[in-house]
Image (tube, rainbow, N blue to C red):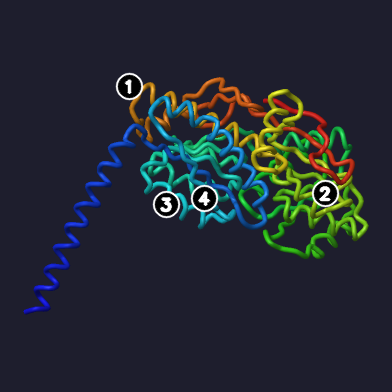
Amino acid sequence: MKLKKSLALLLSGGLAVGIILAGCGAKSGTEKNDSTVIKIATQTPLSGGSATIGEAIKLGAQLKLDEEKAKFKELGFGLQLVPFDDQADPKKGVANAQLIGSDKSVLAVVGHFNSGVAIPSSEVYEKYAIPMVSPANSATDVTDRRLKTVNRIVARDDFQGPAGAEYAVNTLKAKKIFVVQDKTAYGTGIAEAFKKAAEEKGAEILGFEGITVGEKDFNGVLNQILSKKPDLVYFGGIYSEGGLLIKQAREKGIDVPFMGGDGMDSSTLVEIAGDAIKNTYITSLAGDSTKSEEGKKFIEKYKATFNKNTESYSVYGYDTMGLVLKAIEDAIKGNDNKLPTREQVRDAVRGVKDYQGVLTKVSFDDKGDNDFAKVFIYSFPEASYPAQFVDEVGK
C-alpha cells in the first residue's frame, strides 16, 4: 500500500513537471513562431573516392544558402542546409532519399554528382514530389525518363561524348582509339557516346574494355592497350580510377594522349597521376571561373569562407542552390507569401527561365535539361590544377 502511494505521488509529480515544461515549450515556440524553417538537402559523396567533388558541391551550395538567409528572413522563413553523404553508392543514395522524403521541411535537393546514384534516388524524389536539381549529372537517363522533379544545369553525355570525339579526331588527329570505361551509368554512357561519334568521324575503335570502380591494378587492360598501339586512350569514369590508369600507363611506356570526361575534372586527378598527367585532355561540364569578374569574386569568397581552393563543381553547387532558392522564392510569392508545397516548388523549378548564375545561365526544357548547357575542353600541359582551357562547345 505504501509502495502504491509513493508511486502515485511520483507519477503525479512527473505529470506536473511535464505540464510545466510543456507550458515553457509552448511559450518559447510562440516567441519564435515568426519564422518557418525551409530545408534544402544536398546529396553528394562526402566520403570515398569521389569525396573531393562531392564536398565541393556541398560547400558551394552552403555558401549560396548562407548568402540568401537574410532575404528569406524578411520573407518570414529560415533556411537550413541538410547535407547527406551518398557515398557514390546507389543503395545509400536511395536510403538517404527516403529520409529526405520523410522530412516534410525539405523542399528541394541539390545533387547528385554520380548519375548512377541520381537515377534510382530520383525515383524516390518523384514519389514525394521533391524537386532535384543536379549540378553535375550527365547520363542521358537522368532526364530522359521525363520525371517532373528531375532537372540538371549541365550538359548531357550525348553532347559531351561527341564534343570529345570531335576534338580527339579533328584536333589531336587520333585515328586509332582504345576506350576504357568503369561500368557505371556515367562511365559507360559517356564512353559509348564518345565511341559512336569517333567512329562516325572515321576513327577506328581498337577496344572497348571495362574496369571496376575501386580497382587499383590495371595491368590487364594496359597490356591490351600496349599490344593494340592506339593513337589515343579514352577513359569513361571518375578521377580516382582515371588518375591511377594514367599513372600506370605511363610507367608501362604508353605515352599517347589520354582523354576523359568531366568525371576526371578534379585536383585529385593530378595528385594521383603526378607528372604522368601531362598530355591528358578532358571534356568538362564545368566552365572556368577565372574568366569573369563574378567568377573571381566567387573563388575569393569560397577560399576565405572554407580555407579551401575551389574545385571544378564548386561554383555549380553555388549556382544550383541559387536557382533552387529563386524557385522557392517564386513559389512563396505565388502562394500569397505563405510556405509553398513541394509540388509548387517543383513546378517553380521547372518553370525557371534565363536564370543567370555566376557561371551558368539556365532555362529548363520540358525534360529538365538546360537549354544553355555547354561543354568545355581542357588540357594538362603540366602537373597542375586547374587544367588549361582549350575551347568550349555550345548546343
Residue 69 or 130: which is nearer the viewer? 69
Type of amino acid under label 2: Val
Closer to the chain start, of discs 3 and 1, is: 3
Residue at (67% x, 59% y) in the render: 213
Mark 4 = which residue?
84
Residue 233's mark?
A: 2
Which residue type does callout 3 highlight?
Leu
Pinpoint residue 124: horizontal percent, then vertical percent: 43, 47
47 relative to 200, above or below: below
Q: Which mark is residue 99?
A: 3
Which dot, 3 or 1, sits closer to the camera? 1
Q: Amino acid at mark 1?
A: Asp
Q: Is residue 76 above or below residue 42?
A: above
Q: Amino acid at mark 4?
A: Phe
Please tell me which residue is depicted at 38% across the width and 46% down the height of the picture. 103
Say left or right for 180 vs 104. Answer: right
Look at mark 1 in the image and give the residue it sits on. Answer: 336
Q: Upstream in the sequence, badge 1 or badge 2?
A: 2
Q: Secondary structure at mark 1?
A: loop
In-front residue for pair 65/100: 65
